[in-house]
Amino acid sequence: MALSRGLTLLGATLLAMTALGEKPAETTTFSARVNTVPVPVVVRDRNANAIGTLTKENFEVFDNGKRQTIKGFSIERTSSSDAGAPAERAHNLSAGGLVFPDRFVAFIFDDLHLEFGDLAQARNAVLPYFSSEKDPTSRFALFTTSGLGDVDFTNDMAKLRDSLNKVVPREHQTGSRSSSCPPYLSPYVADQIVNRNNPDAISAILAEESKCFPGARVSPEIVLGYARQSLTLSETDTRTAIGVLRGIVRRMSILPGQREAVLVSPGFLSTSFTSEVTEIVSKAARENVVINAIDARGLQADPMFDASRPSYSPSLALVMSGLDRDAQKASGDVLAEIAEGTGGSWFHDRNDLGEGFRRAALAPDVHYVLTYSPVDLKNDGKFHKIKVTLKDAKSYTVLARRGYFAPARPTDEAIRIKQDIDDAVFSRDEALTIPMTLKTEFSNPVNTNVKLAVIAHIDVAPLRFRKAEGLNSDDVVIVSALFDTNGNYVNSNQKTLQLRVKDEHLGERLKAGVTVQTDYDVKPGAYLVRLVVRDTEGEEIASTNGSVEIP
């Protein structure tokens, strides 16, 4: 629904327009519309280069395992120089000569779990993305799971670089990986002792403690207390990190255009936070926020040969290496779940972090958009898994959204329609299925405020009117919204126009169309103006972009 995206639509209605016979709108009940699912797809070769030469016939789409008929197909490129082919279109990145962002990338450093060496390598790999301002259509943000040093979406690369250089580990752990005493107790091993009562883990730590402190009395109870302390600190950090991730997804859900996050982390133990992780994945999937995950530990060595993990006997080394191996997998699994559940990529077991960031953070030169209408879609609110494959896979890798949620129930139809309008407002795509024009006017500033008029002229001739009680009827919802140069939502207004036209006036009035003006009080600056129009009877949603620069 609209409020979930942070969009406050004012719900104002037009005054009665007696010439056309329109009446102020009351509560509108929308009829059902055909469900279509858009699936953006990136295809890369073995060198991670985006492939743009495929056709509709190369793809297959499955919804919960059932093959679907691909009804819509387009190729979208980031450069206007590639436009012109019948099935292609260049991505519209400007409006009225002003360039506005339509891609937002958030780098998230898990400084609560990263060690210094891994974090330093990751910082160096990210630095090239903050080295220039050559891409006016992208905005970058830097977040940390500790919440320290955050920079919201901006094109101020110097500010991002300065904050990046200050990101340091804020690890809270009992013991050290490189120290013999006390022995390092990972969150996974602590969980095995406290919650799983794993006898091998208890015996191994007990033996290491006894070797570490000869002559001291070390009991299973002491080991249990030690494990509880370690697990409590770990859960505190994980709870904080999950809360930050939830907030970032919420923040990005109200941004227009393409939204991607790059989570840089060694992973974390999520055993006690399964439902919270699932909630984040579900929220991101609903709001089309893609989360890519990069395991900053790089190539994982077998713990048996890890010299930084001291042990006192071969038998202890064997037990602890097995536990450490399980810990590596458990912490990585949560990264895989977050990435794969949101349609992102999971880069792991590789030391070339620069390549990982290149794949995750650079906008592909070209991508495809496939659309289909699910057969027998039930309004049960359940998650539908999407799988996109190539009939001739070659050596290509396919990256696409992993799924969507069906409408919750039929009674939520009006809410779903509002969500459709909301999605259109926060998109950058233009679709003139209902012909319309958009222009802006503004007055001279008074007390630093400017009166901005957004004027929409709508051609109502193509609308599908319903004949009832001697009138030709249709309801038209008109939404205008303002965004600043960093893509932040500024303000919006919704008006509902009820068209009630007599037969004898229909031809003349349809030829004239309707003009709707919305006034805003704004500060001087540049704004993107987004206009969305939806009619009830034809169930069409149209949209266009405009811009205004107020000195």
Image (tube, grey):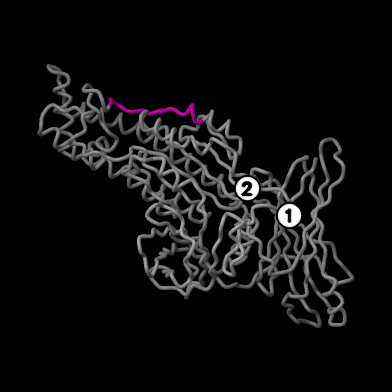
Residue 18, compared with residue 283, is above or below; it is below
Q: Position of residue 326 (x, y in %)?
A: 24, 43
Q: Looking at this view, is 360 or 143 the one in front?
A: 360
- Residue 549 horizontal side relative to residue 369, left or right: right
Crowding at dot 1, Cα within 10 Å, few <14 / some 14-19 / many 20+, comes out as many
Element under disc 1: strand
Would you identify the image quadrant in which residue 235 lies?
top left
Residue 361, compared with residue 425, is above or below; it is above
Q: Looking at this view, is 366 or 170 the one in front?
A: 366
Q: Looking at this view, is 296 or 356 the one in front?
A: 356
Residue at 68 percent of width and 62 percent of height: 543
Q: Position of residue 216 (x, y in %)?
A: 15, 18
Crowding at dot 2, Cα within 10 Å, few <14 / some 14-19 / many 20+, comes out as many
Q: Is 169 part of what is drawn in magenta?
A: yes
Q: Is 237 part of what is drawn in magenta?
A: no
What residue sits right under mark 1 in the picture? 546
Q: Position of residue 182 (x, y in %)?
A: 23, 23
- Residue 72 seen in the figure: yes
Indicate the quadrant containing the N terminus: top left, top right, bottom left or bottom right. bottom right
- Residue 69 horizontal side relative to residue 257, left or right: left
C-alpha gap between disc 2 and disc 1: 13 Å
Residue at 58 percent of width and 59 percent of height: 82
What residue sits right under mark 2 in the picture? 101
* Range shown magenta: 164-176
Residue 326, compared with residue 546, is above or below; it is above
Q: Amino acid at mark 2?
A: Pro
Residue 262, compared with residue 466, is above or below; it is above
